[in-house]
Image (tube, helix red, strand yellow):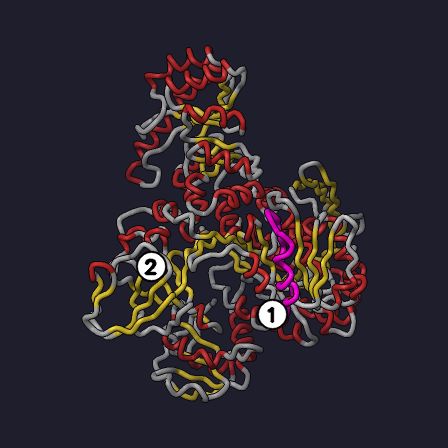
Amino acid sequence: MVNALTLQELLLITNGQLLHQGHHPSVTAISTDSRKIYHGKQTLFVALKGFKVNGHDYLMDAFSKGVRTFIVENDKHISPLTDCTIIVVKSALEALQALAKWNRNQFSGVVIGITGSNGKTIIKEWLGQILASRFDIAKSPKSYNSQTGVPLSIFGIENHHKAAIIEAGISLPGEMAKLQTIIQPNIGIMTNIGTAHAEGFSSQAEKLHEKLLLFKDAQLIVYRKDHAAIHRALTDQFPSDRLVSWSDQPGGDYTLSTKKEKEGSKLTLIKPDLGLFTFHSHFTDEASLENLRHTIVAALVLGLSETQIQQSIPVLDTVEMRLTLKAGIHQCLLIDDTYNNDLAGLDIALEFLNSQRPKKRKILILSDLLQAGDKSSVYDSVSNLISHYQLDMVFAVGSDIGQLKAPPSCTVNFFRDTAHLLEKLPTYALQDDLILIKGARIFQFERVVDALQERIHGTVLEINLNALRKNFTFYKSLLKPSTKTMIMVKAFAYGGGATEIAHHLEQLKADYLAVAYTDEGVSLRQEKIKLPIMVLNPVQESFGNLIKYDLEPVVYSLSFFRQLGEYCQSNATTIKVHLDLDTGMHRLGFGEEDLEALGTLLHQFPALQIASLYTHLAGADEALHEGYSKRQLAQFQSMCSTIKGFLGYAPLMHALNSAGIVRYPAHQLDMVRLGIGLYGIEVNGLHENALQPVSVLKTTISQIKHLKKGDTVGYSRKGTMDHDGKIATIAIGYADGYDRRFSNGTGQVLINGQKAPVIGNICMDMTMIDVTGMNVHEGDEVIIYGHGLSLKEQAKAIGTIPYELLTNISSRVKRVYYLD
């Protein structure tokens, strides 16, 4: 929020009645979900009545998390809320919206409002990424664009932000007028008009008219002129000096034509002053190219230069925000997109499916498209998508989808409902397939996901690929455009799962990968990873696989250089290698005393092509070692000069790890090695707020027991209850990687936003925690590391480092990948 709210302001803004006044600190956060309360005393809980959930049923849950200020619609559930401030309003939703409008009016920065049928979230995310390199910005989380989502997005605007990007979605007439008064955009972006939410409007024209209400007071409106209906409506309703159009043909304010090339697209910009600029992107699909051009024009309107925009384009991602990758039965890979279902969303999801590593078949499980308008034309379009993405099989569920006529190359199986699909699914022998599951909520396709995903015990490691991308983007922003990135995916990608992360890094255009051992590199090659891969610890027995799988070993000694050289010589082959130079780590590597002999070997074995020269900084993560690190860097430069003299060519040079990228930006050289920072840990402590945790380790409560004071818990009776209370047994132990040093109160876990200490010794497969006084139930989710539990602080509690906790997570803990 921009400013804290006093009680008097709350009453005035909401037109509420003060039912009870307790201790009332200023409100700095507003919540409608009791599961997402982090600072209870400063939080106002608004009890919304939803279709399935009534916030009044969760007042005590919010109270247990420290909330003492509530907005309610009646006094039915408030008697247990002692020493609280209770405000009663006629409509909690209207009160929430009024508070959001107040917060918006406190903000003096620029607000960009985005609406349209498709592409809102993508454009918001992309524009946010581009602007974030220059400004401190706020934006809607995920797809928070509804009557409740928009207010919650507005509450994310704080006084340090320079701009805010808010998306607005509607499904009924009258909704946009309310959102307009909340968002009040200075600049508007109209994406397109399509079939989503068509059932709420009498015509496409009515829906378009409603959407354009968002821009009633906007100074500038960005849109694509080629969308004829949008162009007509805007020119009818707004003066020309408020409209900023773009087109792929001459005639718009900006011309942005596209030309698809072998590895992407070229976008040629002609500005109103006839200035020219060429953008380059790896996108080739039409939806992404349209979204990208909206983003470019909006960024230009906001004052960014073409060069600044181009710097961010290479790291923009294509994916929808709600897709989840899950391991399936029989080596299948599932893409869970059971959130919603419309034509544009299907296109995006299929694009994502198409970008995954190859499997035996590409399969779509699809329900009726309920929000689609004209059914026949919509299913014709679905058929075209099936053909375009070359699907092998479709499972079609519902009554309307029977109109689907798939191309001859695709087998379609029709089912009248989800129950019949589930009954027949085991007969289809799914094996090593890539399966997209996309359906409207009422079809309960989560049951399909449950049937097809690999069986897991209650512990999972969730990996947020968007957070990974954002961290990658942050580090890229610290580098010169010419600096290459080598990403460390050794040790199962720091516990995150090397294959999926490596595949994602290929999409992010990383330059190199690094693994510890040859078999790690072989596994990546077998999963179709094509990036160059450096092997840090090769052994003589692996020489054959290094050649076979095009892996690039590190050579660190004269004897190893000779062994590899003789192997290549006898097998009449060449190999790229990386020379490790020891400048002060004193672990592996050539010393200065080895250089003369190394020069002889370089001439003797030219089959070893030197891809890079590198060194390790021993103390880049601490300022006290700065003098030592700079001496290492100077020595490295000197050694590299000598070796280049032997070679007659210049290999890549690299010295900086994650910590070094931050601390020694002047020494980027040709490449940097990004490791722990990519996974959300900034070991210097200088930019922790710029990174996002990538992994969340979570489990569930298996059982709850009520114990008496003096009862003991666990092996060796190490845990003793010092009070009457209750414990919960959770489904994780040291065999899963939960370190035994967390035993006996050293460790804490998070349940429903509250911390609970470990009691007794951690067992092989289970851990007991003290949940006395907490409102928890069997089956509740428990966070071990992640949101609300800093991995860095957890590691510090047992005298170790985050690397150890991450890499110790057992392979039996299933990895789930998602995009928020």
412 displayed left or right of 544: right
Say which residue appears at 49% left-offset and 27% top-offset: 546
| The residue stretch that appears in magenta | 419-443
Q: Which residue is mark 1?
A: 146
Q: CA distance from mark 2 to mark 1?
A: 41 Å
**Which residue does the numbered mark 2 point to in the structure image?**
766
Around disc 1, counting alpha carbons within 10 Å, would you say few (fewer than 14), some (14 to 19), or many (20 or more)?
A: some
SS for callout 1:
loop
Looking at the image, the residue that sits furthest to the front is 427
Q: Is residue 103 above or below residue 517?
A: below
Q: Position of residue 167 (x, y in %)?
A: 61, 63
Q: Is residue 648 visible?
A: no
Mark 2 falls on what kind of element? Answer: loop
Q: Quadrant of residue 562?
A: top left
Q: Name the residue at 44% across, 75% down.
A: 44
Please tell me whether residue 549 belongs to the stretch shown in magenta.
Answer: no
Q: 817 and 362: which one is in front?
A: 362
Q: Amino acid at mark 2?
A: Met
- In this view, the mark in front (2 or 1): 2
Considering depth in this image, is 327 or 237 the residue closer to the camera? 327
Q: Nearer the viewer, residue 285 or 44?
A: 285
